[in-house]
Image (cartoon, rainbow, N blue to C red):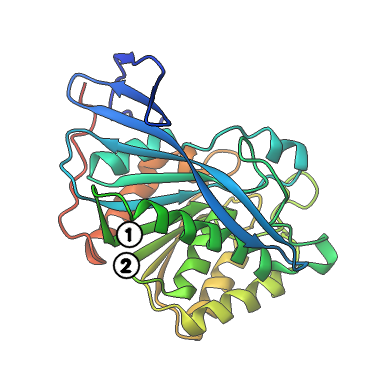
Amino acid sequence: MKPQHYRVASLATLATFIGLAVFTATTAHAKLVQAIINVPVKVTNAYGKVIEKDAVVTVFYDDTTPPPRPIAVINHGRAPYPDKRAAMGRSTFVTNARWFAAMGFLVVVPTRLGYGVTGGDDVEDTGDCNRKNYPPGYDAAAVQTLQILAHVRERTDVLPDRTLVLGQSFGGTTAITVAAKNPPGVLATINFAGGGGGNPETQPQEPCGTNRLKAMFASYGETARIPTLWVYTENDQYMGPKYPREWFDAFKAKGGVGQFVQFPPNGKDGHPLFTQDPSVWRPTALEFLRANGYPDLQPKEEGRK
């Protein structure tokens, strides 16, 4: 059962304030403030086409945590089918955003180009299963992440040099891609079930181009010096139980800095552990963060009403 850290008492009415759509989820002790912003991004896809568009980005903070706040960027995954990518709406990860916000982070959740409410060209396309070209797709996601981060760092209520980047599935790999770029001010990254080319309906536990992914992660290890945490489950129906460890080992062998954790099976498919069962990974993530730039993090009391 998923832990509940807050019980929402009311949802403030939709308001417009200085061009931002602002929402507040009220509890007896705190408000989770949520704002929707548009951030211009410029990306080059695998075929050399330059795409410029506004990405829809959701920003959260807990009004009981004093500014300035460190930043946590959370990236979503990638559905195997275009109609599902188009239908994903606006990425929020609100349960986990609330958890990070309660510890003092300003949480930034982009809906990247080619997905949901942002729409536009599919700049993260990596090609057909038998001829995957992964690096340009993940680079496009990482470039968007860093451009959005640069925009958010202009705020007066943030600590620009204390950033965490994390993500689920395609977003998890994006976190490692960001680490390989060693951007100033990013202290750590967390990869939840990262990889690519997985489809449990057509090839359960056998993602496309596993050796190409291994080579890509190895190349990331040559440059990545930011601490990374890799979180997987034994019954990940997208990535399988063995390939993630091989990818991590290739990354580490080339000099990458990281910690690999594989949890026991979770539900029918452990791939969505990040949202499916946060109670499993949160203690590990908290220990990692405290050891890598965030020594004073304190989650708010579990079960508080």
Percent of width and height locating residue 114: 68, 46
Which residue is pictured at 23% across the width and 44% down the height? 103
Q: Quadrant of residue 130?
A: bottom right
Q: Specify whether 279 is left or right of 215.
A: left
In the picture as drawn, the residue positioned furthest to the front comes out as 18
Percent of width and height locating residue 225: 39, 78
Q: Specify whether 72 is left or right of 55.
A: left
Q: Name the residue nearer the viewer: 246 or 75.
A: 75
Number of residues whose C-alpha sits closer than 10 Å to that of mark 2, classed few (under 14), some (14–19) or many (20 or more): some
Which residue is pictured at 18% across the width and 45% down the height? 67
The residue indicated by pointer 2 is: 185
Q: Name the residue nearer the viewer: 135 or 201.
A: 135
Quarter holding the N terminus is: top left
Percent of width and height locating residue 288: 30, 61
65 is higher (above) or lower (below) than 222:
above
Q: What residue type is disc 1 on?
A: Thr
**Earlier along the polypeptide chain: callout 2 or callout 1?**
1
Number of residues whose C-alpha sits closer than 10 Å to that of mark 1, classed few (under 14), some (14–19) or many (20 or more): many
The residue indicated by pointer 1 is: 163
Percent of width and height locating residue 292: 26, 66
Q: Specify whether 205 is left or right of 258.
A: right
Q: Do the CB atoms of the residues marked 2 and 1 lie less than 8 Å apart? A: yes
Q: Give the label on residue 274, or none.
A: none
122 is higher (above) or lower (below) than 223:
above
How many marks are shown on the rendered structure?
2
299 is higher (above) or lower (below) than 19:
below
Mark 2 lies on a secondary structure that is loop
Quarter holding the C terminus is: top left
Q: What residue type is disc 2 on?
A: Gly
Res 152 seen here: yes
Mark 1 lies on a secondary structure that is strand
Which residue is pictured at 40% across the width and 62% down the height? 189
